[in-house]
Each structure stands twice: as structure tokens, then as C-alpha cells.
Image (tube, rainbow, N blue to C red):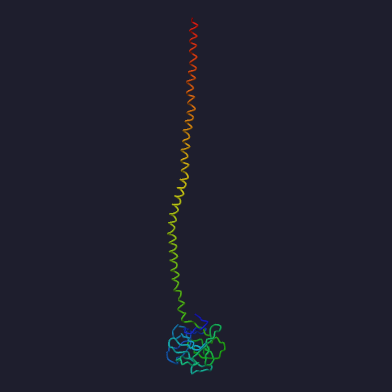
Amino acid sequence: MKVKKIVSGTCYQIAAKDGRVVEIAGMDCNSGATVQLWENGNGDSQKWLAVEVETGWYKLQNKMSGKVLDVMSAGSDNGARLHAWDYVGKDNQLWAFEAVKGGFKLRSKRSGRVLDIVDMSAENGARLQIWDDVDGENQVWVVTDETAAPAKKTAAKKPAAKKAAPAAKAAEKKAEAAKPAEKAVAPAAKAAEKKVEAVKAAPAAKAAPAAKAEKPAEKKAEAVKAAPAVKAAPAAKAAEKKPAAPKAAAKKTVKK
């Protein structure tokens, strides 16, 4: 991860704009080992621990050898080469990181000159030197936090997100399981509705026999009305038969 600020105690890679990084040649752990540019192989010989020795001034200690980035023979002139050496607390072993567009300039405390690629070479094995600051592209360095590189593997945390999916599925299954209970409630509700309808219908059913009961009463009243008529009929017939007797008596009187 590219950085905008140097943090003491952090291990960095220092790369040219074309991606080649500052390394100790041949993984040499001895004092005087050549410092050069090479393709990034992510090796410890290509990583540098920045330790702030004075405010704003850092020693750059190689992760593989423990040696520091040093200007040979405490040089301060243009073209003085760099190598790795034991740290002895000298100004030619201290560097300031100055933020510029595209990265940093590394300025030597001893001379005030900046880290530069010899002959602006684009080949592996290109040597490093100090030179006047001319704002050249071969004097701009991209600093990457080496300790943050493993953090790019945070994609491995994606399974955690996948774990959330089963939890969501479990919630869905729980909701599905609740549906039968809802279905069971529905028939019960329907049964309750039917019961209410039956109760409402019951009075009507009971009222019907009452209504039917009125019909025998009507029949009885009709029978009562009809009864006098029946009894009156014999009385009328008897009345009609009684005048017949005097007629017979009259006949007897005529014969005398």
C-alpha cells in the first residue's frame, strides 16, 4: 500500500517509478554490500525498516542484513555511490522523506543531495547515488508499506460474509416454519366463523317451529268456528220436522 507519511518502526519497500525496488545485491549481508535496483521479488533484501533517529531524519535498515543505507566514504559530492553498512550514527546514514507529486524524495542529511539513479538507467542492477535535486523522475520514489501488503489478503474475510448468508437462510426457514402455524390458525378461524354463523342461525331455526305451532292453533280456531255450524244443522232439521205433525192431525178432523 502506497503511503503518504512515513511512520517510524515500519518496514517499507522503496521503488523507482517503473516499479524496480532498492535492494542489497546478491543478498549480501556484509558491510559494503552493493545497493542497486531490481525487479520486485518481495524478498527481505528489498525491504527497509525506517527508524526515526532525529526529528524528520530516518535510518533505513535492511530487513535481511540489518545494515543501513549509507553514502560511501561519507561522500557529499554529486555521483557519490550508495552501499550497505553497519549503523554508526553518522549523517551520511540519515535520510529525510520529502513528499512530492507521485511519491517522495530521499534527501541525505550529510550533503543535502537526493537519492538518484545513476545514468537514469532502466535496467536491473542500476546503481544508486546522490545528486543535486533537479526534480527529475529518477529522483522520485514510491514508498510502499510492506507490513500492509498481507492486509490485501483481507479478501479471506469474505467467508465471514458467507456465514451471514446461512444465518439469513435460517431466518427464512424459521419464517417458513411459522407459516404452517399460520395455516393452522386459518382453519380454526374459519371454524369459529362457522360456529358464529350457526349460533346466529339457531334462533331462526327455533322460531320456525314456533311459527309452525301457530298453524295448529289456527286449525283449532277454524274447527271451533265450524262446530256451531254442524250443530246448527240438526236443530234446523228438527225444526223442519216438527210442523209436519199438526198436518196429520188436520187430516183426522176432515174424516169426521
Question: Residue 213, image x and y in percent?
Answer: 46, 35
Tell which residue pokes out farthest to the top in this image: 256
Question: Residue 32, image x and y in percent?
Answer: 45, 92
Q: Nearer the viewer, residue 126 or 196?
A: 196
Q: How many marks?
A: 0
Question: Residue 145, image x and y in percent?
Answer: 48, 82
Question: Residue 207, image x and y in percent?
Answer: 47, 40
Tell which residue pokes out farthest to the right in this image: 134
Picture quarter containing residue 100? Answer: bottom right
Q: Nearer the viewer, residue 174 or 18?
A: 174
Q: Nearer the viewer, residue 26 or 213?
A: 213
The vertical placement of 163 against 105, above or below, is: above
Q: Nearer the viewer, residue 176 or 241?
A: 241
